[in-house]
Amino acid sequence: MLFFLNNKRVVITGGTGSFGTALAQRLAASGNCDVVIFSRNRDKQERMRERFPSFRYIVGDILNRLDLENAIDGADYLIHAAALKEVPYCEENPMEAALNNITGTNNVIESSITKGLKKVLIISTDKAVLPSSAMGISKAMMEKVVWAKANQIDVNSSSQKPVTALSVLRFGNLLGSTGTVIPLFIKQIRDGKPLTVTNPDMTRFMMTLEHSVNYALFALEKGLNGDLIIERASSVSIGDIATAVIENTPGSSSAKYTITGARAGEKLYEIMATEQEMLRSEELNNNYLRVSMLHSVKPRQTNPLKELNSHTAPRLENSDLKAIINDISTQMG
């Protein structure tokens, strides 16, 4: 039971996406809070309404402050998942990425402060760390917007007016979400095509949708104003994913993979936290770190700490990867 959400109202921006839907399912099962789904896609909202009829659904755009303020009126918490996340699309449309991921997030924050929400959790990505893609750059700037607003709140926190706590978490790649690699590989095998592997040595932090929901709810509960919540996530190489999909997908005995080379903006490995961020970190439990980005909080560590990156992170166990592939294959039908 999510006791901290008892009788609270939670808004999910981008609530009809893969993560938003998984989060909605968890909140519906909890049954102890009101949920508002805010997104641009009316058709997806209607399909969600069939599954979760008790939720409130609002069609709107994070670029429209009136839409936002209507959606969050009376809310306690907001989880901001609306974003442009597809790396190739953002490479081709960098201004659209900037508009949605930076300006849209600024609108979410300012509207939440105006309406007096208790907490706003912003969903970011490891691609925001030392970014090489338009999507990553836009997310990095999005984080800068959060830190600037959080520091303004911290400076003014001595006032008696309730403040809105702003925090960020970074996701790795969400296994099984729309457009990700495992569903693509399974489809290619079913279509009798070779798997298209960018670089078998490329590594990524990986998490299932269920895991990402646990991560987000933990961050929502524990995050303080100005916090960056980091998970010590497992990673996996693209070559290992391709091999595991071939080994665990029916009809793949003759399947091969071809190396296509990295796409524009893609890196060989991702970084979840830099050395400088690690110096400001403290343990929340065995899996999570809190990194305060407030200017008033000085670095907590004195000894050099290595960055958290997907090349050096613990690798996902093959049995876990196999189970994930089988689950995704079953869901695809």
Image: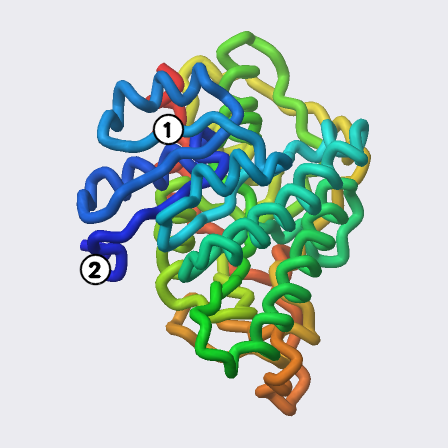
Q: Which mark is residue 57?
A: 1
> How packed is label 2: few (under 14 Cα within 10 Å), some, or many (20 or more)?
few
The one nearer the camera, 171 or 306, is 171
Q: Give the left or right position of residue 53, taking residue 72 as reference.
A: left
Q: Does any portion of residue 219 appear in the rendered image? A: no
**Residue 6 position in % (x across, y down):** 21, 55
The answer to whether any part of residue 115 appears in the image is yes
- Tag 1: amino acid: Tyr
- For the N terminus, the quadrant is bottom left
The three-letter amino acid code for the residue at tag 2 is: Phe
Q: Where does the image place residue 216, in percent across and percent down from the top left?
A: 42, 53
Mark 1 or 2, closer to the camera: 1
Mark 1 Cα-neighbour bin, 10 Å: few <14, some 14–19, many ≥20? many
From the image, tell me which residue sits under label 2.
3
Residue 169 position (above or below residue 194): below
Q: Residue at x 45, y 72 (%)?
A: 161
Q: Quadrant of residue 47?
A: top left
Is 203 left or right of 289, judged from the image as shown?
right
Q: Earlier in the sequence, mark 1 or mark 2?
A: 2
Q: Percent from the top left, x then y, of residue 297?
A: 60, 84
Instruction: Please tell me which residue is depicted at 73% across the width and 54% down the height of the picture.
Output: 141
How far, Cα to Cα, is label 1 from label 2?
24 Å
